[in-house]
Image (spheres, helix red, strand yellow):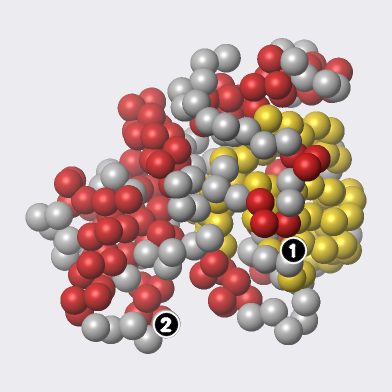
Amino acid sequence: MLKLFETETLSLDKLTDEQTAIKVKDFSVWLNNSLVLNKINMRIPKNKITAMIGQSGCGKSTLLSSFNRMNELNQKYAFSGEVELDGRDIYNKKENVAKLRTKVGMVFQRPNPFPMSIYENVCFGLRIQGKTERRMLDDIVETSLRNAALWDEVKGRLFDSALLLSGGQQQRLVIARALALKPEILLLDEPTSALDPLTTLHIEELINQLKKTTTVVIVTHNMQQAARVSDYSVFLHQGELIEYSDSDSLFTMPAKKQTEDYITGRYG
């Protein structure tokens, strides 16, 4: 498959703690009393793009949401094991979840801009943190919109409603809103599934630029997209981690027959 962006890959089994953004240890999840993830073990490298692929219902979005504890919004959620960020277990009872979600931002499948101006969308999280100095907010709004490849399109209408933007612009705005908080990790759950091919290309180029400063984890049903944009790929099946390697190897020489069957369309 065509690789749009060349990158240097690291050996996953030799990642040091300094090279690791997220460490998952024997992590299992139950939703509504059903086992969704079964003893997942993996290390996600810093400043790389990691894609999660697999059939619908395989657990990839559940695993993604576990990295900033969004799954806890489901009252019938239970887990075992650990998820470590910077060497600490984020599920420790003393963990500040609000602070965690500042460090680990998330963008969902469908854009969800707030019913307010473009400007106020971007600085929403900053205002919650008590940051109100106008010049600082102006600078962060511009930088975040530039980093989300949206500034040139909206700089003349920052105080118009964000709901007037196109779907692709709204998705980039939501990414800018997340970037304004300077997250260490950005979680993307099917961020281009509702977008046209040209807008999808813009988002993919943006994702590649983000890894200069941010670790990116993306869930996608589109295997071509995973192969194009990611450095590493994870194949999940029925809650099990089947294979995890650099994307070039996984898509051209998969080590497991289940992986080969999935990427060649024999099932899924």
Viewer-closest of 176 and 110: 176
- Where residue 138 sits, quadrant-wise, is bottom left
Give the vertical position of 195 relative to 136 (above or below).
above
Quadrant of the frame with the N terminus: top right
Horizontal side of 47 relative to 208 (left or right) equals right
For marks 2 and 1 on the same chain, the one whose residue lies earlier in the sequence: 1
In the rendered image, residue 74, in percent from the top left (x then y), is placed at: 71, 66
Q: Give the residue pinned by disc 1.
A: 84
Q: Is residue 10 visible?
A: yes
Q: Give the residue pinned by disc 2.
A: 129
Give the vertical position of 194 relative to 216 (above or below).
above
Q: Residue at x 65, y 47 (%)?
A: 45
Mark 2, secondary structure of its residue: loop
Q: Residue at x 18, y 51 (%)?
A: 154
Give the vertical position of 236 relative to 21 (above or below).
above
Viewer-closest of 173 and 253: 253
Give residue 249's mark. none
Horizontal side of 54 relative to 117 (left or right) equals right
Q: Residue at x 43, y 34 (%)?
A: 204
Q: Amino acid at mark 2?
A: Gln
Q: Amino acid at mark 1?
A: Glu
Q: Residue at x 85, y 56 (%)?
A: 25
In the rendered image, residue 58, in percent from the top left (x then y), is placed at: 77, 39
Cα–Cα span, label 2 and label 1 = 24 Å
- Where residue 168 sits, quadrant-wise, is top left
Mark 1, secondary structure of its residue: strand
Quadrant of the frame with the C terminus: top right
